[in-house]
Image (tube, helix red, strand yellow):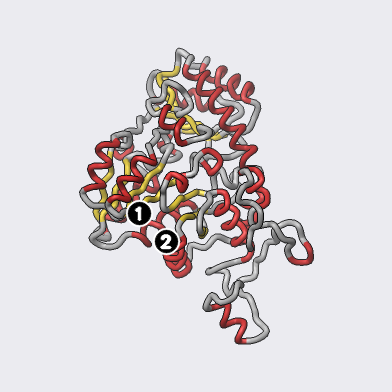
Amino acid sequence: MKNKNLQNKQNGTKAVWAGQNDLFYYGATQVPIVNSVTFGYKNVDDWFDVAVGKKEGHIYSRNTNPTVAVFEEKVRVLENAEAATSFSTGMAGISNTLYTLLNQGDRVVSIKDTYGGTSIIFLEFLPKKGIEVSLCETTDHDGIEAEVRKGCKVLYLETPTNPTLKVLDLKRLISVAHEVGATVVVDNTFATPINQQPLSLGADLVLHSATKYLGGHSDAMGGLVCGKKTLIDQIFHYREINGATLHANSAYMLLRGIKTLELRVLRQNENAMKLGEYLEGHPKIDSVFYPGLKSHPSHEIAKKQMTGFGGVLSFSLVGDFENVKLFLNSLELAHLAASLGSVGTLIGPPKVTSHVEATEEERKALGIPESLIRCAVGIENIEDIIADFDQALSKI
């Protein structure tokens, strides 16, 4: 579906209208859920024209689907990308993208602080395929640049990182990667298109776990990659054959959620900042990691490339893991649960959330202390969340 007159519109308007300018079947104003696996044609010539790309249309839902197509178009517009394709989960998007771009003998450079599932791909799966992996200290920009210059097919970045909220200077690293002809992939899940637009900074591809902020309600899973059409075409081909397809029902739920993306993210930005400031001043908190705080080592970089600092922060309590358990078990409002980006606050230690797949030794090697707590702040009234944290901390 073509979009008209949205190029100069703001993100809140794009989130509502992108991909939905026209009426749908029977004059419906909302995107229908098209659960049909296959799509029929009245004659072979039309069928053939769609099959070879001469006409728009759908043939088989493993490849493309009308509901899914609207979701892809909406995120494409929000990220100002040339093209987009979707997946059944965020990890399907990450893995399909890496497996499309990398072959035996290639070299990928990334950072130590990527999401746990991504780290497993780098530490376990890619080396088995004969792909060289170099994982750099996340905030050592000089070191990352040096590794890129040694030879690099793909530079894979995540900022802010999960779960330690480190921030990378995207423009600087993208420039070096392009000097050696590398493709730059950025996971923008934490920031969302509302807070950060990596493509405008020169990235080639942007990834999202749509399960998180795009959907926003912890009730649908999905992934998406957008960017240069030549690259998206390759990734789409890999995905359509390997079958990690986003289902129409999930696409519908994600579409419904994304319409309020800007409203939710702006509220979560505000809530996370207030919670971070509260925690930073609490005597039972050892350290707070949030790029919006002036104390954050990369605060100035974040200010330069982000318009908001996100809804996720992490912090360490004084004492040992028993204090972590006591604090978490005493909370009344937040869910002790994995994932992030939901309307309700979600909280937990990386050992059972972002890095549950990793061993304690691997988490330590990645710079993640066992005492760390990740909190994805929701859209509740922040005064109630702070009061809940305060009563839980008083138990320590």
Q: Which residue is mark 1?
A: 183
For residue 231, which numbered disc appears in the image?
2
Question: Helix, strand or loop at disc 2?
Answer: helix
Label number found at residue 244: none
How far apart are the alpha carbons under marks 1 and 2?
9 Å
The amino acid beneath tag 1 is: Thr
Crowding at mark 1 (Cα within 10 Å: few <14, some 14-19, many 20+): some
Q: Quadrant of the N terminus?
A: bottom right
What is the tally of numbered marks visible in this picture?
2
Residue at 64% in and 46% down: 9
Compare residues 118 and 56 and report the one nearer the observer: 56
**Location of residue 265 by image quarter:** top right
Residue 296 drawn at (x, y percent): 41, 25
Q: Position of residue 193 (x, y in %)?
A: 53, 44
Label 1: element kind: strand
CB under 8 Å between discs 1 and 2: yes
Q: Quadrant of residue 64?
A: bottom right
Q: Residue at x 56, y 52 (%)?
A: 75
Q: Is residue 162 visible?
A: no
Q: Mark 2 belongs to which amino acid?
A: Leu
| Residue 253, position as x, y percentages in the image | 64, 52
